[in-house]
Amino acid sequence: MRRLREAAGLTQEELADLAGLSVRTIRDIELGRTARPYRRSLELIAQALGLNAEGAARLVRTRKARGAEIAEAGAAPTADDGPRAAQLPPVTGDLIGREDLIAAYERYLSLPGAAVGPRAPLLITGPAGVGKSMLATRLAHGVAHLYPDGQLFTDLHGHDAVEPLDPASVLRGFLCSLGVSPSNLPGSLSGLTALYRSLLADRRVLILIDNARATEQVRPLLPNSPGSAVLVTSRAQLRGLLIRDGAQLLETPYLSEPAATALLEEVIGPRRLRAEPAAGRELIRLCGGLPLALRVLAERAAQRPGLLLRDLVEELTRPGFPLDALDVPDDPASTLRTVLSWSYRALPPRAARLFRLLGLHEGPDIRLDAVARLTAAGSGSASLNRLAAELSVLVDAHLLESPAPGRYRFHLLVRLYAAERAAEEESTRAGGIAYAAPRFAGQDEARHRLDGKPRGAQPPARTREWYGEHDNALRLTCSSGGPGRSTGAY
Ligand SMILES: Nc1ncnc2c1ncn2[C@@H]1O[C@H](COP(=O)(O)OP(=O)(O)OP(=O)(O)O)[C@@H](O)[C@H]1O
Ligand SMILES: [Mg+2]
Protein backbone atom coordinates (compact mmCIF):
# COMPACT_ATOMS: atom_id res chain seq x y z
CA MET A 1 0.00 0.00 0.00
CA ARG A 2 2.91 2.31 0.73
CA ARG A 3 4.04 1.95 -2.90
CA LEU A 4 0.60 2.95 -4.15
CA ARG A 5 0.45 5.94 -1.79
CA GLU A 6 3.90 7.14 -2.76
CA ALA A 7 3.04 6.67 -6.42
CA ALA A 8 0.04 8.92 -5.86
CA GLY A 9 2.39 11.50 -4.27
CA LEU A 10 0.55 11.49 -0.96
CA THR A 11 1.88 11.59 2.59
CA GLN A 12 0.27 9.34 5.21
CA GLU A 13 -1.48 12.41 6.64
CA GLU A 14 -2.87 13.42 3.25
CA LEU A 15 -4.12 9.91 2.52
CA ALA A 16 -5.72 9.70 5.95
CA ASP A 17 -7.41 13.02 5.32
CA LEU A 18 -8.72 11.99 1.92
CA ALA A 19 -9.92 8.59 3.14
CA GLY A 20 -11.50 9.96 6.33
CA LEU A 21 -9.38 7.61 8.45
CA SER A 22 -6.89 8.26 11.19
CA VAL A 23 -3.21 8.60 10.36
CA ARG A 24 -2.62 5.75 12.76
CA THR A 25 -4.87 3.45 10.75
CA ILE A 26 -2.87 4.20 7.59
CA ARG A 27 0.46 3.89 9.36
CA ASP A 28 -0.48 0.60 11.01
CA ILE A 29 -1.66 -0.97 7.78
CA GLU A 30 1.54 0.09 6.01
CA LEU A 31 3.74 -1.21 8.80
CA GLY A 32 1.82 -4.47 8.91
CA ARG A 33 0.79 -3.80 12.51
CA THR A 34 -2.84 -4.26 11.56
CA ALA A 35 -3.09 -7.89 10.61
CA ARG A 36 -6.78 -7.56 9.78
CA PRO A 37 -7.60 -4.22 8.20
CA TYR A 38 -11.30 -3.78 7.65
CA ARG A 39 -12.56 -4.21 4.11
CA ARG A 40 -14.33 -0.87 4.37
CA SER A 41 -11.11 0.89 5.42
CA LEU A 42 -9.31 -0.56 2.39
CA GLU A 43 -12.15 0.48 0.10
CA LEU A 44 -11.91 4.06 1.40
CA ILE A 45 -8.14 4.01 0.91
CA ALA A 46 -8.53 2.66 -2.63
CA GLN A 47 -11.03 5.40 -3.38
CA ALA A 48 -8.71 8.08 -1.96
CA LEU A 49 -5.86 6.72 -4.06
CA GLY A 50 -8.03 6.98 -7.11
CA LEU A 51 -7.81 3.26 -7.87
CA ASN A 52 -10.34 1.78 -10.26
CA ALA A 53 -12.57 -1.08 -9.21
CA GLU A 54 -10.01 -3.67 -10.22
CA GLY A 55 -7.19 -1.88 -8.36
CA ALA A 56 -9.36 -1.64 -5.28
CA ALA A 57 -10.23 -5.34 -5.46
CA ARG A 58 -6.52 -6.14 -5.82
CA LEU A 59 -5.67 -4.11 -2.71
CA VAL A 60 -8.25 -6.00 -0.70
CA ARG A 61 -7.10 -9.33 -2.16
CA THR A 62 -3.45 -8.58 -1.44
CA ARG A 63 -4.16 -8.18 2.24
CA LYS A 64 -6.12 -11.39 2.23
CA ALA A 65 -3.39 -13.29 0.43
CA ARG A 66 -0.94 -12.20 3.12
CA GLY A 67 -3.00 -14.09 5.65
CA ALA A 68 -5.04 -11.19 6.86
CA GLU A 69 -8.68 -11.76 7.67
CA ILE A 70 -10.62 -8.82 6.48
CA ALA A 71 -13.45 -7.93 8.74
CA GLU A 72 -16.72 -7.17 7.10
CA ALA A 73 -17.52 -4.29 9.41
CA GLY A 74 -17.65 -0.65 8.35
CA ALA A 75 -14.74 1.77 8.65
CA ALA A 76 -13.83 3.19 12.01
CA PRO A 77 -15.09 6.59 12.96
CA THR A 78 -12.08 8.81 13.22
CA ALA A 79 -10.71 10.46 16.30
CA ASP A 80 -7.78 12.82 16.55
CA ASP A 81 -4.56 10.95 16.22
CA GLY A 82 -3.28 11.00 19.80
CA PRO A 83 -0.57 8.92 21.40
CA ARG A 84 -1.32 5.20 21.53
CA ALA A 85 -2.69 4.34 24.98
CA ALA A 86 -0.34 2.08 26.94
CA GLN A 87 -1.95 2.23 30.35
CA LEU A 88 -1.24 -1.19 31.84
CA PRO A 89 0.25 -0.89 35.32
CA PRO A 90 3.63 -2.54 35.83
CA VAL A 91 3.85 -6.03 37.32
CA THR A 92 6.12 -5.83 40.33
CA GLY A 93 7.81 -9.06 41.34
CA ASP A 94 7.51 -12.52 39.82
CA LEU A 95 4.10 -14.06 39.37
CA ILE A 96 4.49 -17.41 41.08
CA GLY A 97 2.56 -20.62 40.50
CA ARG A 98 0.34 -19.40 37.69
CA GLU A 99 2.18 -20.80 34.69
CA ASP A 100 -0.68 -23.05 33.55
CA LEU A 101 -3.28 -20.31 33.83
CA ILE A 102 -1.06 -17.88 31.95
CA ALA A 103 -0.48 -20.38 29.15
CA ALA A 104 -4.17 -21.26 28.79
CA TYR A 105 -5.50 -17.73 28.88
CA GLU A 106 -2.76 -16.22 26.75
CA ARG A 107 -3.93 -18.71 24.16
CA TYR A 108 -7.51 -17.53 24.57
CA LEU A 109 -6.51 -13.88 24.26
CA SER A 110 -4.34 -14.64 21.25
CA LEU A 111 -7.12 -16.17 19.15
CA PRO A 112 -7.82 -13.92 16.21
CA GLY A 113 -10.94 -11.94 16.99
CA ALA A 114 -12.79 -12.99 13.85
CA ALA A 115 -12.40 -16.65 14.80
CA VAL A 116 -14.40 -16.27 17.99
CA GLY A 117 -16.73 -13.42 17.06
CA PRO A 118 -16.83 -10.57 19.54
CA ARG A 119 -14.58 -12.06 22.16
CA ALA A 120 -16.27 -12.84 25.48
CA PRO A 121 -14.77 -10.81 28.31
CA LEU A 122 -12.51 -12.77 30.63
CA LEU A 123 -13.75 -12.47 34.21
CA ILE A 124 -11.07 -13.22 36.80
CA THR A 125 -12.62 -13.80 40.21
CA GLY A 126 -11.44 -15.05 43.58
CA PRO A 127 -11.09 -14.13 47.23
CA ALA A 128 -9.45 -10.96 48.51
CA GLY A 129 -5.71 -11.02 48.03
CA VAL A 130 -5.56 -14.24 46.00
CA GLY A 131 -3.77 -12.41 43.19
CA LYS A 132 -6.49 -11.57 40.65
CA SER A 133 -5.08 -8.16 39.76
CA MET A 134 -1.53 -9.44 39.51
CA LEU A 135 -2.60 -12.35 37.31
CA ALA A 136 -4.70 -10.13 35.05
CA THR A 137 -1.96 -7.53 34.72
CA ARG A 138 0.65 -10.14 33.89
CA LEU A 139 -1.69 -11.77 31.35
CA ALA A 140 -2.40 -8.41 29.77
CA HIS A 141 1.31 -7.64 29.41
CA GLY A 142 1.89 -11.03 27.82
CA VAL A 143 -0.57 -10.37 25.00
CA ALA A 144 -0.32 -6.57 24.73
CA HIS A 145 1.65 -6.82 21.47
CA LEU A 146 -1.36 -8.50 19.85
CA TYR A 147 -3.43 -5.39 20.48
CA PRO A 148 -1.49 -2.80 18.52
CA ASP A 149 -4.05 -0.04 18.91
CA GLY A 150 -3.29 0.25 22.58
CA GLN A 151 -4.11 -0.95 26.07
CA LEU A 152 -6.63 0.77 28.31
CA PHE A 153 -6.66 0.31 32.07
CA THR A 154 -8.97 1.33 34.86
CA ASP A 155 -9.14 0.46 38.54
CA LEU A 156 -12.80 0.63 39.50
CA HIS A 157 -11.98 0.54 43.23
CA GLY A 158 -14.85 -1.87 43.79
CA HIS A 159 -13.53 -3.00 47.14
CA ASP A 160 -11.39 -0.37 48.74
CA ALA A 161 -11.43 2.86 50.63
CA VAL A 162 -11.76 4.98 47.47
CA GLU A 163 -15.29 5.55 46.09
CA PRO A 164 -16.05 3.03 43.32
CA LEU A 165 -15.67 4.65 39.89
CA ASP A 166 -18.76 5.08 37.77
CA PRO A 167 -18.60 3.90 34.14
CA ALA A 168 -19.26 7.38 32.69
CA SER A 169 -16.08 8.80 34.23
CA VAL A 170 -14.13 5.76 33.07
CA LEU A 171 -15.48 6.17 29.53
CA ARG A 172 -14.59 9.86 29.46
CA GLY A 173 -11.02 8.90 30.37
CA PHE A 174 -10.91 6.07 27.80
CA LEU A 175 -12.30 8.27 25.02
CA CYS A 176 -9.73 10.98 25.67
CA SER A 177 -7.02 8.29 25.58
CA LEU A 178 -8.44 7.20 22.22
CA GLY A 179 -7.96 10.71 20.89
CA VAL A 180 -11.39 12.31 21.42
CA SER A 181 -11.08 15.87 22.56
CA PRO A 182 -12.83 16.61 25.88
CA SER A 183 -15.08 19.17 24.16
CA ASN A 184 -16.49 16.41 21.91
CA LEU A 185 -17.48 14.05 24.70
CA PRO A 186 -21.19 13.17 24.81
CA GLY A 187 -23.01 14.04 28.01
CA SER A 188 -24.91 10.80 28.64
CA LEU A 189 -23.63 7.36 29.54
CA SER A 190 -25.33 5.85 26.49
CA GLY A 191 -23.74 8.49 24.22
CA LEU A 192 -20.32 7.83 25.71
CA THR A 193 -20.75 4.07 25.27
CA ALA A 194 -21.91 4.46 21.67
CA LEU A 195 -18.94 6.65 20.73
CA TYR A 196 -16.53 4.30 22.51
CA ARG A 197 -17.91 1.25 20.68
CA SER A 198 -17.79 3.04 17.34
CA LEU A 199 -14.19 4.04 17.88
CA LEU A 200 -13.18 0.53 18.87
CA ALA A 201 -15.01 -1.09 15.96
CA ASP A 202 -11.95 -0.71 13.75
CA ARG A 203 -9.26 -1.11 16.37
CA ARG A 204 -7.61 -3.82 18.34
CA VAL A 205 -7.38 -2.66 21.90
CA LEU A 206 -6.86 -4.58 25.13
CA ILE A 207 -8.91 -3.32 28.04
CA LEU A 208 -8.13 -4.23 31.64
CA ILE A 209 -10.89 -3.40 34.12
CA ASP A 210 -9.53 -4.06 37.58
CA ASN A 211 -11.37 -4.51 40.88
CA ALA A 212 -14.96 -4.26 39.70
CA ARG A 213 -17.76 -4.56 42.20
CA ALA A 214 -20.82 -4.95 39.99
CA THR A 215 -21.76 -5.84 36.43
CA GLU A 216 -23.30 -2.38 35.87
CA GLN A 217 -19.87 -0.83 36.39
CA VAL A 218 -18.42 -3.01 33.66
CA ARG A 219 -21.08 -3.50 30.97
CA PRO A 220 -20.87 -0.01 29.41
CA LEU A 221 -17.11 -0.54 29.04
CA LEU A 222 -17.46 -3.62 26.82
CA PRO A 223 -16.75 -3.03 23.14
CA ASN A 224 -18.83 -5.05 20.68
CA SER A 225 -16.27 -5.71 18.00
CA PRO A 226 -14.13 -8.79 17.51
CA GLY A 227 -10.75 -7.06 17.46
CA SER A 228 -10.57 -5.97 21.09
CA ALA A 229 -10.42 -7.97 24.31
CA VAL A 230 -11.50 -7.24 27.86
CA LEU A 231 -10.15 -8.58 31.13
CA VAL A 232 -12.15 -7.91 34.29
CA THR A 233 -11.13 -8.70 37.86
CA SER A 234 -13.58 -8.86 40.74
CA ARG A 235 -14.06 -10.43 44.13
CA ALA A 236 -17.70 -10.89 43.18
CA GLN A 237 -19.13 -13.46 40.79
CA LEU A 238 -20.66 -10.76 38.54
CA ARG A 239 -23.40 -13.14 37.47
CA GLY A 240 -24.83 -10.64 35.00
CA LEU A 241 -21.54 -10.55 33.14
CA LEU A 242 -21.39 -14.33 33.08
CA ILE A 243 -24.98 -14.91 32.03
CA ARG A 244 -25.88 -11.97 29.81
CA ASP A 245 -22.49 -11.06 28.41
CA GLY A 246 -21.24 -14.64 28.20
CA ALA A 247 -18.06 -13.83 30.10
CA GLN A 248 -15.46 -16.56 30.36
CA LEU A 249 -14.81 -17.34 34.03
CA LEU A 250 -11.34 -17.76 35.48
CA GLU A 251 -11.53 -18.65 39.19
CA THR A 252 -8.17 -17.78 40.73
CA PRO A 253 -7.14 -20.64 43.03
CA TYR A 254 -5.09 -20.37 46.20
CA LEU A 255 -1.40 -21.06 45.64
CA SER A 256 -0.24 -24.66 45.90
CA GLU A 257 2.18 -25.49 48.70
CA PRO A 258 5.26 -25.49 46.44
CA ALA A 259 4.22 -22.13 44.94
CA ALA A 260 3.61 -20.67 48.41
CA THR A 261 7.04 -21.91 49.46
CA ALA A 262 8.57 -20.32 46.37
CA LEU A 263 6.88 -17.02 47.20
CA LEU A 264 8.22 -17.06 50.76
CA GLU A 265 11.64 -18.02 49.46
CA GLU A 266 11.66 -15.23 46.93
CA VAL A 267 11.21 -12.60 49.63
CA ILE A 268 13.10 -13.97 52.61
CA GLY A 269 15.63 -16.15 50.82
CA PRO A 270 15.97 -19.94 51.06
CA ARG A 271 18.47 -19.82 53.96
CA ARG A 272 15.96 -18.89 56.63
CA LEU A 273 13.45 -21.44 55.39
CA ARG A 274 16.15 -24.12 55.47
CA ALA A 275 17.11 -23.09 59.00
CA GLU A 276 13.52 -23.45 60.26
CA PRO A 277 11.72 -25.85 57.94
CA ALA A 278 8.94 -26.74 60.39
CA ALA A 279 8.12 -23.09 61.12
CA GLY A 280 8.21 -22.33 57.38
CA ARG A 281 5.73 -25.13 56.69
CA GLU A 282 3.50 -23.91 59.49
CA LEU A 283 3.52 -20.34 58.12
CA ILE A 284 2.52 -21.69 54.74
CA ARG A 285 -0.26 -23.74 56.30
CA LEU A 286 -1.55 -20.76 58.24
CA CYS A 287 -1.58 -18.55 55.15
CA GLY A 288 -3.45 -21.26 53.27
CA GLY A 289 -1.98 -20.32 49.88
CA LEU A 290 -3.19 -16.71 50.08
CA PRO A 291 -0.51 -14.66 48.31
CA LEU A 292 -1.37 -11.41 50.07
CA ALA A 293 -0.90 -13.01 53.50
CA LEU A 294 2.28 -14.79 52.39
CA ARG A 295 3.72 -11.62 50.96
CA VAL A 296 2.91 -9.51 54.01
CA LEU A 297 4.43 -12.10 56.35
CA ALA A 298 7.45 -12.55 54.12
CA GLU A 299 8.07 -8.79 53.92
CA ARG A 300 7.80 -8.61 57.68
CA ALA A 301 10.40 -11.33 58.05
CA ALA A 302 12.61 -9.79 55.37
CA GLN A 303 12.68 -6.46 57.15
CA ARG A 304 13.74 -8.10 60.40
CA PRO A 305 16.55 -10.52 59.57
CA GLY A 306 16.94 -11.42 63.26
CA LEU A 307 13.31 -12.51 63.62
CA LEU A 308 12.74 -16.23 63.88
CA LEU A 309 10.06 -17.74 61.69
CA ARG A 310 8.70 -19.55 64.71
CA ASP A 311 8.09 -16.16 66.35
CA LEU A 312 5.95 -15.24 63.36
CA VAL A 313 4.07 -18.51 63.73
CA GLU A 314 3.58 -17.74 67.38
CA GLU A 315 2.16 -14.30 66.53
CA LEU A 316 -0.28 -15.83 64.08
CA THR A 317 -1.47 -18.53 66.43
CA ARG A 318 -1.62 -16.49 69.61
CA PRO A 319 -5.16 -16.26 70.97
CA GLY A 320 -6.62 -12.81 70.66
CA PHE A 321 -6.04 -10.92 67.44
CA PRO A 322 -3.79 -13.04 65.26
CA LEU A 323 -4.42 -10.90 62.22
CA ASP A 324 -2.28 -8.25 63.95
CA ALA A 325 0.62 -10.32 62.66
CA LEU A 326 -0.47 -9.38 59.15
CA ASP A 327 -0.50 -5.64 59.78
CA VAL A 328 1.68 -3.45 57.62
CA PRO A 329 2.27 -0.30 59.65
CA ASP A 330 3.22 2.03 56.79
CA ASP A 331 0.72 0.59 54.32
CA PRO A 332 -2.61 -0.01 56.05
CA ALA A 333 -4.34 -0.65 52.72
CA SER A 334 -2.44 -3.87 52.25
CA THR A 335 -3.11 -5.42 55.64
CA LEU A 336 -5.30 -8.45 55.37
CA ARG A 337 -7.77 -7.07 57.91
CA THR A 338 -8.30 -3.87 55.90
CA VAL A 339 -8.55 -5.72 52.62
CA LEU A 340 -11.20 -8.07 54.05
CA SER A 341 -13.05 -5.21 55.70
CA TRP A 342 -13.85 -3.73 52.27
CA SER A 343 -15.68 -6.89 51.28
CA TYR A 344 -17.31 -7.23 54.68
CA ARG A 345 -18.57 -3.64 54.78
CA ALA A 346 -20.18 -4.07 51.36
CA LEU A 347 -22.36 -6.98 52.58
CA PRO A 348 -26.06 -6.53 53.21
CA PRO A 349 -26.72 -6.53 57.00
CA ARG A 350 -28.13 -10.08 57.18
CA ALA A 351 -25.23 -11.56 55.24
CA ALA A 352 -22.78 -9.58 57.39
CA ARG A 353 -24.29 -11.04 60.55
CA LEU A 354 -24.20 -14.52 59.11
CA PHE A 355 -20.53 -13.98 58.29
CA ARG A 356 -19.80 -12.96 61.89
CA LEU A 357 -21.66 -15.90 63.39
CA LEU A 358 -19.97 -18.35 61.05
CA GLY A 359 -16.66 -17.01 62.32
CA LEU A 360 -17.55 -18.50 65.69
CA HIS A 361 -17.65 -22.00 64.25
CA GLU A 362 -14.26 -23.61 64.38
CA GLY A 363 -14.76 -26.90 62.62
CA PRO A 364 -13.15 -27.45 59.23
CA ASP A 365 -16.49 -26.96 57.51
CA ILE A 366 -20.15 -26.66 58.36
CA ARG A 367 -23.36 -28.05 56.92
CA LEU A 368 -26.40 -25.98 56.08
CA ASP A 369 -28.47 -27.48 58.91
CA ALA A 370 -25.70 -26.67 61.39
CA VAL A 371 -25.61 -23.10 60.08
CA ALA A 372 -29.36 -22.98 60.67
CA ARG A 373 -28.87 -24.00 64.30
CA LEU A 374 -25.95 -21.62 64.69
CA THR A 375 -28.03 -18.72 63.56
CA ALA A 376 -31.42 -19.80 64.93
CA ALA A 377 -32.73 -19.68 61.36
CA GLY A 378 -35.29 -22.46 61.70
CA SER A 379 -35.09 -25.88 60.10
CA GLY A 380 -38.09 -25.81 57.72
CA SER A 381 -37.31 -25.99 54.04
CA ALA A 382 -38.33 -22.35 53.45
CA SER A 383 -35.95 -21.19 56.19
CA LEU A 384 -33.17 -23.39 54.88
CA ASN A 385 -33.65 -22.05 51.35
CA ARG A 386 -33.52 -18.50 52.60
CA LEU A 387 -30.40 -19.29 54.57
CA ALA A 388 -28.78 -20.95 51.56
CA ALA A 389 -29.50 -17.80 49.54
CA GLU A 390 -27.83 -15.66 52.21
CA LEU A 391 -24.86 -18.00 52.30
CA SER A 392 -24.56 -17.70 48.55
CA VAL A 393 -24.09 -13.95 49.00
CA LEU A 394 -20.99 -14.76 51.05
CA VAL A 395 -19.86 -17.37 48.54
CA ASP A 396 -20.35 -14.93 45.66
CA ALA A 397 -18.28 -12.35 47.51
CA HIS A 398 -15.61 -15.06 47.92
CA LEU A 399 -15.69 -14.66 51.68
CA LEU A 400 -16.85 -18.25 52.09
CA GLU A 401 -16.29 -21.38 50.05
CA SER A 402 -18.80 -24.07 49.24
CA PRO A 403 -16.79 -27.22 48.52
CA ALA A 404 -19.98 -29.28 48.00
CA PRO A 405 -23.67 -28.46 47.88
CA GLY A 406 -24.90 -27.60 51.38
CA ARG A 407 -21.37 -27.46 52.82
CA TYR A 408 -19.42 -24.34 53.62
CA ARG A 409 -15.95 -23.49 54.83
CA PHE A 410 -13.75 -20.50 55.46
CA HIS A 411 -10.18 -19.85 54.52
CA LEU A 412 -8.48 -19.92 57.91
CA LEU A 413 -7.52 -16.25 57.85
CA VAL A 414 -10.97 -15.17 56.73
CA ARG A 415 -12.45 -17.13 59.62
CA LEU A 416 -10.16 -15.35 62.04
CA TYR A 417 -11.37 -12.06 60.61
CA ALA A 418 -15.02 -13.14 60.91
CA ALA A 419 -14.38 -14.15 64.52
CA GLU A 420 -12.85 -10.73 65.19
CA ARG A 421 -15.92 -9.07 63.74
CA ALA A 422 -18.14 -11.28 65.92
CA ALA A 423 -16.15 -10.35 69.00
CA GLU A 424 -16.41 -6.65 68.15
CA GLU A 425 -19.97 -6.46 66.89
CA GLU A 426 -22.03 -9.29 68.34
CA SER A 427 -23.39 -9.21 71.85
CA THR A 428 -21.54 -11.86 73.81
CA ARG A 429 -24.70 -13.72 74.59
CA ALA A 430 -25.71 -14.01 70.98
CA GLY A 431 -22.21 -15.05 70.10
CA GLY A 432 -22.16 -17.59 72.90
CA ILE A 433 -25.46 -19.08 71.87
CA ALA A 434 -24.36 -19.19 68.31
CA TYR A 435 -21.19 -20.98 69.22
CA ALA A 436 -22.74 -23.37 71.67
CA ALA A 437 -25.77 -24.34 69.63
CA PRO A 438 -24.25 -26.87 67.26
CA ARG A 439 -22.61 -28.61 70.16
CA PHE A 440 -25.86 -29.15 72.02
CA ALA A 441 -29.16 -30.53 70.92
CA GLY A 442 -30.18 -27.15 69.55
CA GLN A 443 -30.69 -23.52 70.18
CA ASP A 444 -32.92 -23.92 73.25
CA GLU A 445 -30.45 -26.10 75.01
CA ALA A 446 -27.66 -23.65 74.30
CA ARG A 447 -29.75 -20.74 75.49
CA HIS A 448 -30.71 -22.61 78.63
CA ARG A 449 -27.09 -23.35 79.48
CA LEU A 450 -25.90 -19.85 78.72
CA ASP A 451 -28.76 -18.19 80.51
CA GLY A 452 -27.79 -20.06 83.61
CA LYS A 453 -24.30 -18.63 83.60
CA PRO A 454 -23.30 -15.74 85.81
CA ARG A 455 -22.40 -12.44 84.14
CA GLY A 456 -18.81 -11.33 83.82
CA ALA A 457 -15.57 -13.23 83.54
CA GLN A 458 -15.56 -16.78 84.76
CA PRO A 459 -12.66 -18.99 85.62
CA PRO A 460 -11.97 -21.59 82.93
CA ALA A 461 -13.04 -24.39 85.30
CA ARG A 462 -16.65 -23.18 85.31
CA THR A 463 -16.59 -22.69 81.58
CA ARG A 464 -15.42 -26.25 81.21
CA GLU A 465 -18.27 -27.42 83.31
CA TRP A 466 -20.84 -25.74 81.01
CA TYR A 467 -19.38 -26.95 77.84
CA GLY A 468 -18.08 -30.25 78.99
CA GLU A 469 -14.94 -30.04 76.86
CA HIS A 470 -11.91 -28.01 77.62
CA ASP A 471 -10.85 -27.37 74.03
CA ASN A 472 -14.13 -25.90 72.96
CA ALA A 473 -14.32 -23.70 76.01
CA LEU A 474 -10.90 -22.30 75.23
CA ARG A 475 -11.84 -21.85 71.61
CA LEU A 476 -14.96 -19.96 72.58
CA THR A 477 -12.80 -17.69 74.70
CA CYS A 478 -10.51 -17.03 71.76
CA SER A 479 -13.34 -16.72 69.27
CA SER A 480 -14.99 -14.11 71.38
CA GLY A 481 -12.00 -11.85 71.35
CA GLY A 482 -9.57 -13.55 73.67
CA PRO A 483 -8.64 -12.72 77.21
CA GLY A 484 -8.64 -9.04 77.87
CA ARG A 485 -10.85 -8.19 74.91
CA SER A 486 -14.26 -9.42 75.79
CA THR A 487 -14.36 -11.05 79.16
CA GLY A 488 -18.13 -11.41 78.98
CA ALA A 489 -17.55 -14.34 76.67
CA TYR A 490 -16.60 -16.50 79.60
N1 LIG B 1 1.08 -15.51 42.04
C1 LIG B 1 1.65 -14.59 42.81
N2 LIG B 1 2.99 -14.58 42.99
C2 LIG B 1 3.57 -13.65 43.76
N3 LIG B 1 2.92 -12.68 44.40
C3 LIG B 1 1.59 -12.63 44.26
C4 LIG B 1 0.88 -13.57 43.46
N4 LIG B 1 -0.40 -13.28 43.50
C5 LIG B 1 -0.52 -12.20 44.27
N5 LIG B 1 0.67 -11.80 44.74
C6 LIG B 1 0.87 -10.67 45.63
O1 LIG B 1 -0.20 -10.70 46.56
C7 LIG B 1 -0.72 -9.40 46.79
C8 LIG B 1 -2.20 -9.37 46.45
O2 LIG B 1 -2.37 -9.57 45.06
P1 LIG B 1 -3.51 -8.87 44.21
O3 LIG B 1 -3.60 -7.42 44.53
O4 LIG B 1 -3.30 -9.24 42.80
O5 LIG B 1 -4.77 -9.61 44.82
P2 LIG B 1 -6.30 -9.41 44.41
O6 LIG B 1 -6.86 -10.78 44.35
O7 LIG B 1 -6.42 -8.55 43.22
O8 LIG B 1 -6.85 -8.66 45.70
P3 LIG B 1 -8.19 -7.76 45.83
O9 LIG B 1 -9.32 -8.72 46.02
O10 LIG B 1 -7.94 -6.95 47.05
O11 LIG B 1 -8.34 -6.93 44.59
C9 LIG B 1 0.13 -8.46 45.97
O12 LIG B 1 1.13 -7.98 46.81
C10 LIG B 1 0.74 -9.33 44.91
O13 LIG B 1 1.97 -8.83 44.55
MG1 LIG C 1 -7.37 -6.73 42.86
Image (cartoon, rainbow, N blue to C red):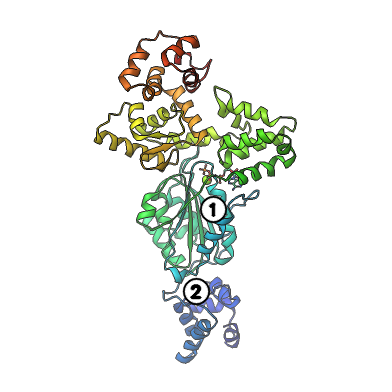
Where in the figure is residue 269, as x and y percent of width and height? Answer: 72, 41
Image: 111 above or below 320: below
Looking at the image, residue 448 sits to the left or right of residue 140; the answer is left
- Asked whether mark 1 and ligand 1 are closer than 8 Å, the reply comes as yes
Type of the residue with mark 1: Ala
Question: Image quadrant of residue 428?
Answer: top left
Query: In the image shown, does 392 or 242 lie closer to the viewer?
Result: 392
Say which residue label 1 marks.
136
The residue at the point 73 percent across, 37 percent down is: 272
Query: In the image shown, does 385 or 355 lie closer to the viewer?
Result: 385
Question: Distance of mark 1 from mark 2, alpha carbons?
Answer: 32 Å
The residue at the point 37 percent across, 25 percent down is: 438
Q: Quadrant of the N terminus?
A: bottom right
Type of the residue with mark 2: Leu
Judge the density around disc 1: few (<14), some (14-19), many (≥20) Cα neighbours within 10 Å: many
Judge the density around disc 2: few (<14), some (14-19), many (≥20) Cα neighbours within 10 Å: many
| Sooner in the amino-acid sequence: mark 1 or mark 2 | 2
Label number found at residue 21: 2
Query: In the image shown, does 359 or 468 lie closer to the viewer?
Result: 468
Look at the image and tell me whether residue 14 can be seen. yes
Image: 16 above or below 168: below
The residue at the point 39 percent across, 10 percent down is: 453
Where in the figure is residue 250, as x and y percent of width and height? Answer: 47, 53
Where in the figure is residue 3, as x and y percent of width and height? Answer: 60, 85
Depth check, mark 1 against mark 2: the one in front is 1
Looking at the image, residue 353 sits to the left or right of residue 380; the answer is right
User: Contact (CB < 8 A) between labels 1 and 2?
Assistant: no
Question: Image quadrant of residue 73?
Answer: bottom left
Look at the image and tell me whether residue 457 can be seen. no
Residue placed farthest to the front in the image? 468
